[in-house]
Amino acid sequence: MINREGPAYKVFRGVVLAVWLVITLFPLAWILITSFKPAGSIASYPLQYLPRPFTLDNYKQLFSTGSFGTFVANSLIVSILAAAVATAIALLGAYVLDRFSFRGRGALLMAFLVTQMIPAFIALGPLYALMVQFRLVDSRAGLTLVYVAMCIPFCTIMLRGFFANVPAELEEAAMVDGCGRLQALMRIIVPVMGPGLVATFIFNFVNCWNELFLSVTLINTETSKTIPAALNGYISSFNIEWGPMSAAAVLAIIPTMGLFALASRYIVQGLTSGAVKG
């Protein structure tokens, strides 16, 4: 029988967590170090573990010779719009699935789950043909619509778990006082579900911010590329621009890290409230 309160177990747990932390943070630390190395020392032998000399040339190159600012703006616009629209649609869908009983509800939930098991490349051909037909290829609007459709199924299931923890009596009392169903949802339920909505929005935002496969396929011109597609452009058949790519990766990580740091309390509260009913 393991004594979980004993000093030996606490030391063992601390060592395991420390090792796991090092393994997790090492790739991020290496990318950060590489971003400050001069071009000639990144792939040199013997390997240099620290930047010698320390330089900001890779960061300067992003904005002087490239369009990194445009890529950041595109990613922000697409990710924020897609996350907001998908969260709003998923909110309404989850409300219907939790509060109403109708024929086919179970099948609809299963369909939402099944869509998460289908690889994106299987639907790429029909999706690309549809985007061409509506003239949405190589446009931020088209990529935003695709991301909205991609995020809705899982987020609907996610928000349904949050609705299950909100008593129906709250909205019934509001409706008795004269609110319509939609008013009761927006004025009573949505404020209560604030942490869940924040967690869902951040989940959508991070998925859209990091998505590569669809953005590379549907976006061609430099003015419409997002950050993942731009990072992929640093890799060619005969060369990899490690310095600028590492600098761009560091800058691409900052918004998501900042978002999680600012909203970590809401994320934890939202995910835990949706995990257990009652």
Image (cartoon, helix red, strand yellow):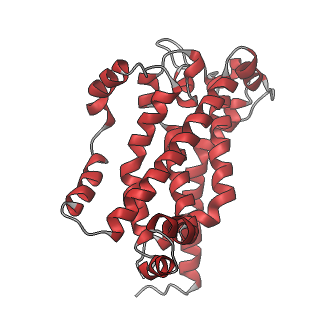
User: Which residue: 40% across, 68% down?
Assistant: 161
Residue 150, compared with residue 163, is above or below; it is above
Q: Position of residue 244 (x, y in %)?
A: 66, 23
Task: Give the quarter of the figure containing the N terminus.
Answer: bottom left
Q: Which residue is drawn at 55% across and 35% down?
A: 78
Image quarter for residue 15?
bottom right
> Can you say whether 182 is above or below 153 in the image?
below
Q: In which quarter of the image is residue 209?
A: top right
* Residue 48 in view here: no
Q: Residue at x 50, y 70 (%)?
A: 184
Q: Where is residue 113 in the image (x, y as percent from the top left)?
A: 28, 54
Residue at the extreme top of the image, as rendered: 238
Return the x and y of residue 224 as percentages of the image width and height: 56, 21
Residue 94 sits above or below residue 257 on the image: below
Does residue 141 sit above or below 95 in this rendering?
A: above
Residue placed farthest to the front in the image?
178
Q: Where is residue 227 in the image (x, y as percent from the top left)?
A: 58, 30
Left or right: 161 in relation to 3:
left
Q: Which residue is drawn at 49% across and 11% down?
A: 238
Quarter of the image where one finds residue 27: top right
Q: Is 89 or 57 nearer to us in this picture?
A: 89
Q: In this view, does 54 lie to the left or right of 165?
A: right
Circle count? 0
Q: Is residue 175 visible?
A: yes
